[in-house]
Image (cartoon, rainbow, N blue to C red):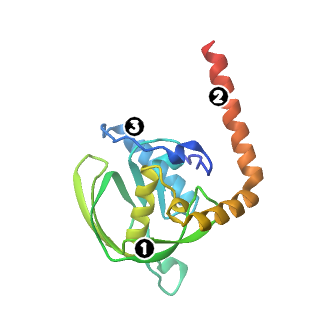
């Protein structure tokens, strides 16, 4: 397994709609394992494929469901691998403070459905249905948004989004400039290799 690089805003892949997965093979299984390693390394509870540079309809999650008396007593959903997901039912409303690995240091309150029904495929291509509520439902909706090219800041009012982005850009300017420079160099090298 390998730890993959998590791309951060404003990387353009975060705004890209992801393609359906059609092959459930060893390459997909390795990618899922690498995503899990990456999510664990980053202490995340969810990770979408485009957050690690692959625009395919895959996300992982491992969400806390309750906290015990100590750090080792935390109960979670366990790792759930979600491929080609579709929300087939929504109920209620829940406001939750969300963060995102692609927006380091930023969190905002977002309103989402309190309970959802989800249909998806597992790593073998088998059809799975799941009903989720609370934080598990929030995580699913957050990650599914990623696959549709929507970030959690897109769920904010225009005024709140403007303020949040201004603060995020101020706090992360150096990292964003480094990322932009890496992308320019990568593009330049690719152009030189073509010619």
Location of mark 1 (residue): 135
On the image, the x and y values in percent for residue 25 come to: 32, 38
Question: In this rendering, would 148 be left or right of 128?
Answer: right
Of all residues, the one furthest to the right in this rendering is 174
For the residue pair 49 and 1, the one nearer the viewer reads as 49
The percent position of residue 67, horizontal first and vertical second, equals: 47, 82
Q: Which mark is residue 187?
A: 2
Residue 2: which disc?
none
Location of residue 6 in the rendering, given as x and y in whole percent from the top left corner: 58, 50
> CA gap, disc 1 to disc 3?
30 Å
3 in relation to 112, above or below: above
Q: Residue at x 51, y 57 (%)?
A: 151
Q: Residue at x 46, y 48 (%)?
A: 49
**Secondary structure under badge 2?**
helix
Mark closest to the chain's N terminus, 1 or 3? 3
**Taking 98 as reference, is 120 above or below it?**
above
Q: Dot 1 lies on which element? A: helix
Q: Is residue 176 visible?
A: yes
Comparing 150 with 134, the one in front is: 150
Q: Report the side of 1 relative to 84 (left or right).
A: right
**Of residues 150 and 125, which is closer to you in this image?**
150
Give residue 30's position: percent from left, percent from top: 42, 42
Residue 30 higher or lower than 139, as above or below: above
The residues tagged by marks 3 and 2 sit, at their Cα atoms, a distance apart of 25 Å
Please tell me which of labels 3 and 2 falls first in the chain. Answer: 3
The residue shown at (29%, 52%) is 122
Which residue position holds label 3?
27
Residue found 42% across the figure and 50% down from its top:
148
């Amino acid at each position: 397994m390998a730890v993959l690089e998590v791309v951060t805003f404003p990387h353009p892949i975060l705004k890209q709609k992801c393609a359906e997965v059609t092959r459930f093979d060893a390459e997909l299984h390795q990618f899922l394992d690498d995503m899990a390693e990456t999510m664990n390394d980053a202490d995340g509870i969810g990770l979408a494929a485009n957050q690690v540079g692959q625009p395919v309809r895959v996300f992982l999650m491992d969400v806390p469901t309750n906290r015990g008396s100590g750090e080792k007593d935390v109960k979670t959903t366990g790792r759930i691998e979600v491929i080609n997901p579709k929300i087939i039912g929504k109920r209620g409303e829940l406001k939750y403070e969300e963060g995102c690995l692609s927006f380091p240091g930023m969190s905002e309150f977002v309103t989402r459905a309190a309970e959802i029904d989800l249909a998806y495929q597992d790593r073998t291509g088998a059809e799975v249905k799941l009903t989720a509520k609370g934080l598990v439902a929030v995580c699913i909706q957050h990650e599914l948004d990623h696959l549709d090219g929507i970030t959690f800041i897109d769920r904010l009012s225009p005024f709140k989004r403007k303020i949040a982005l201004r603060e995020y850009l101020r706090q992360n300017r150096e990292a964003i400039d480094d990322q932009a420079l890496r992308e320019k160099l990568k593009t330049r090298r690719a152009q030189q290799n073509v010619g």
